[in-house]
Image (cartoon, rainbow, N blue to C red):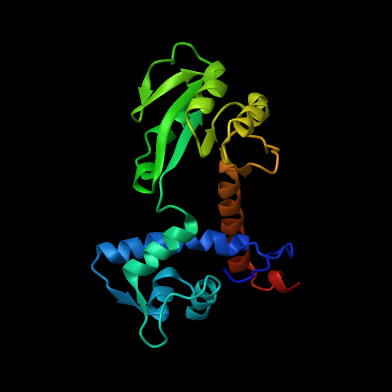
Amino acid sequence: MSEIIDRNNNPGRVSDAMTRRMPAYYRRLLELENLGFLVISSKELARRMGLTDSQIRHDFNAFGGFGRRGRGYNVELLRKAIGDILDINREHNLIIIGIGNMGKALAQYKGFSEHSFKLMALFDANSELVGKRFGGARVYAINGLAKYLQKNPTDIAVICTPAAGAQELVEPLAAGGVKGIWNFAAVDLQAPDSILVNNVHLTDSLMMLAFRMHEKQVLEEDKSWISE
């Protein structure tokens, strides 16, 4: 991988914007592959994704480039190459902690298995849920988490607990060898360097949508406000 400078000027780290585009490339290429496409140009891929072809070439060149000038990209090979970059061409073991409405919904989401994320176990403090199954995975008592991690290598933990108890889960997860936390609790978690955290705030997307709706309305009412 070539050296890429992110917005914080950290060398060797792919920018957040590029990171967000890579899964989108993968999804679109998988769609094209299923439609029977064998080869696609950067211009055509850009049109289908609402990007510029120079942006796509820039992104792909950051990882060494995948096509030949004038010949386009082999759709299957490019999709597999991006899968390698995203590290989804191998299986990742997943657990979910907190089996409320969000936890149950995620447990039954079929997209995990379709993209190499294998749901192994569920954990909750509610004894009435222990032993039940959701999405094919069994619910275990939360006090058995550390013992489970000792015997079952786990890559990612999904936290869907109330905010009050979320932070205290980080230490046993890190000690148990978990490498990433996908956090849906309404609090930003702090973690040691050994574990990456993606804090997901569902209302952020709604607030962004509300802002864009308001922006559009204001622009339509007075197109001069943006330059003031």
Image quarter in which the C terminus is found: bottom right
Q: Position of residue 26 (x, y in %)?
A: 41, 61
Query: In the picture, residue 48 is in which quadrant?
Result: bottom left
**Badge count:** 0
Q: Position of residue 60 (x, y in %)?
A: 50, 72
Q: Position of residue 99 (x, y in %)?
A: 47, 25
Q: Residue furthest bottom?
A: 70
Query: In the picture, residue 82 is in which quadrant?
Result: bottom left
Rendered residue at 52%/39% (across/down) = 156
| Relative side of 135 to 123, left or right | left
Q: Nearer the viewer, residue 7 or 215?
A: 7
| Relative side of 49 to 215, left or right | left
Q: Nearer the viewer, residue 11 or 31?
A: 11
Image quarter in which the N terminus is found: bottom right
Q: Where is 218 relative to 169, above or below?
A: below
Rendered residue at 26%/62% (across/down) = 34
Q: Nearer the viewer, residue 176 or 140?
A: 176
Q: Residue furthest top?
A: 128
Q: Residue furthest left?
A: 36
Query: In the picture, residue 133 is in which quadrant?
Result: top left
| Relative side of 152 to 1, left or right | left
Q: Where is 116 relative to 75, above or below?
A: above
Rendered residue at 40%/53% (across/down) = 89
Rendered residue at 69%/44% (across/down) = 193
Q: Residue furthest front?
A: 151
Q: Nearer the viewer, residue 111 or 201?
A: 111
Q: Position of residue 105 (x, y in %)?
A: 42, 33
